[in-house]
Image: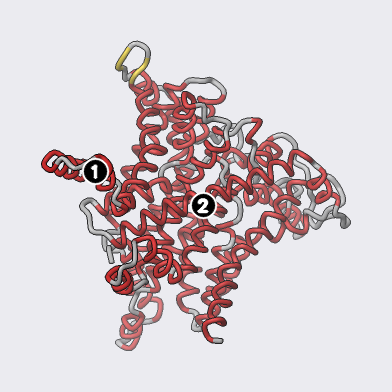
Amino acid sequence: MWLAIIAILVLLFILLPILVLIPLSFTSVNYFTFPPIGFSMKWYQDFLQNKEWIECFFRSLGVAALTAILAVIIGTFASMAVTRMNFKYKKAFMALMVAPMVIPVVIIGVALYNFYAPLRLNNTILGLVLSHTLLAIPIVFITLTAGLKGVDSNIELAAAGLGSKPFGVFFKIILPQIKPSMLSACLFAFITSLDEITVTIFLSGTDTKTLPIAMWESLRNNITPTIAAVSTILIFGTIISFLLPELFKQLFRKKKMG
Amino acid sequence: MLRENSKVDNGVHNKHVPFFIRLKKIVDPKWIMILLPLAFILITTFIPMINLFKLSVVDENGFTLKYLTQVFTQQIYLQVIFLTLKIAFLVTLSCLVLAYPVSYFIVKLKSPKLKKVILQLIMIPFWISLLVRTFSWIVVLQDQGVINSMLKYMGIIDKPAPLLFNTAGVLIGMTHVLLPYMILNVYSTMEGIDRNLVQVAQVMGAKPTRAFWEIFFPLSIPGILSGSMLVFILALGYFITPSLLGGAHDMTISMLIQNNISNTLNWSLASALSLILFLITLVLLGGLLFLMRNHPALKED
């Protein structure tokens, strides 16, 4: 019994910030008290009418989309290599693919800032996409490798034996079987980029400010409930995209059965 | 990589094949699957890192250990390193204390559906922007925040407890961010423990508490160790949470590195600090891999 109480308290601790934030975004005053005073949508209006916030928001979505594409292409290559090929130093290769996940992010940020300077990649979208891609590769690699391990490679061999080219085998045989992991990998890469802040602090400038950077600056300088509204939008966006793969899975299942 | 190149070279020299066939041999799609990701990671991660670390031992006068010794001899830098280790340790400890009962609770649940729902609830904050979560802690912990208002209402305190912009704030915020990692690690180990062993011990006459401490707990230690190591490693590099929730005295290595780049423009020192942070991480990571060498996730196939 006491175990259940502790577990519920810890779960509450995990979910508390989200539970508090959402009602606060509807407050009618420009400071934070809980429970919030009154009800208004003015902080959402403030966000939608602020040109800079909107610009950063769409820039972030664009960078995240490009990152997802690039990270999934590179991640697919890497996990195909690991699951379908035999080569020396495979373990070292795998370690390199997940390394960006454990290297302190500040080090990557400073290192890239230094590396980009002579290449003029600082304060460019390309520079941001490349850095977010390397941060997203580990999670894409892990997700796709797990998915590919569950696929029977004999079917691929049969297809190849019957004359299918490698690309044909991949798109016609493998891809349909790993659709769910592919979808999650895309989503993970997208979210990784959308949330990225530490590396972006170093690499972005005035022309390439992303949403997290705008939020970071607002948090350090003047906190207004607008940021609670932005946060709430992000929370719902994340939860919806989090539920999407599950939804897709069920759709596929229904199709198969029907 | 070297091995493959030399193989291609040999073929070329022996047979004198035309250029485009040579090219086709080199860009055999099979090898691209390895070489492209490898090249990407090396160029975007490891080469920049090596370039950065070079700055700590080479300056305009050539090789020097000046900056590294500076870090290890000056009180301020040692203090920052010590504080970073202390915060990482305390965060690991509080994560463990919170994660263990929750994991045990989930493992003991009978309904697999409820298990899945709880695990998903634990995973949700995992994917919510770090900034959003940190921001909400500012709201919760501030003087007129949720916690202080509640404590005041219940009459426990009459002056707001200082929870924000000090080490307590950093600890709470970081524990919150890293707790899911710990729960997932401890939980997956517990799920693998053969529960019949505990039952056998009880049948043989051991009281439930004794059966837990002498059978179940020792078997869950691998999960505790790997989870703690992972949380500790991740906590060492934290930057966002301590800079937003901490006070002026809660400077971590990551913050000091950023400070040296953006404010004092001392690249050599920032590089020396990065190198030290990287080496600490690397040593701990070696320990983690050693602990997890029997973990199913690391085994091939």
Residue B102 horizontal/vertical position (percent): 51, 68
- Residue at horizontal 71 percent and vertical 49 percent from the top: B139
The answer to whether residue A79 is seen in the rendering is yes
Quarter occupied by residue B85: top left
Residue where numbered disc 2 is placed: A69
Q: Chain of mark 2?
A: A
Residue visible at 44% across and 32% down? A111
Name the residue nearer the viewer: B148 or A246: A246
From the viewer's side, name the closer residue of A103 and B18. Answer: B18
Query: How would you rate the neighbour count of disc 2 (Cα within 10 Å): few for under 14, some for 14-19, many for 20 or more?
Result: some
> Residue at 87% across / 55% down in the picture?
A40
Instruction: From this view, report whether residue B73 is shown above or below residue A57.
Output: above
**Which one is nearer the viewer's eye here, B54 or B253?**
B54
Q: Is residue A156 left or right of residue A39?
A: left
Image x and y of residue B200, in percent = 31, 85
Q: Are marks 1 and 2 in contact (CB under 8 Å)?
A: no
> Judging from the image, what secondary structure is the residue with disc 2 in?
helix
Residue occupied by mark 1:
B22
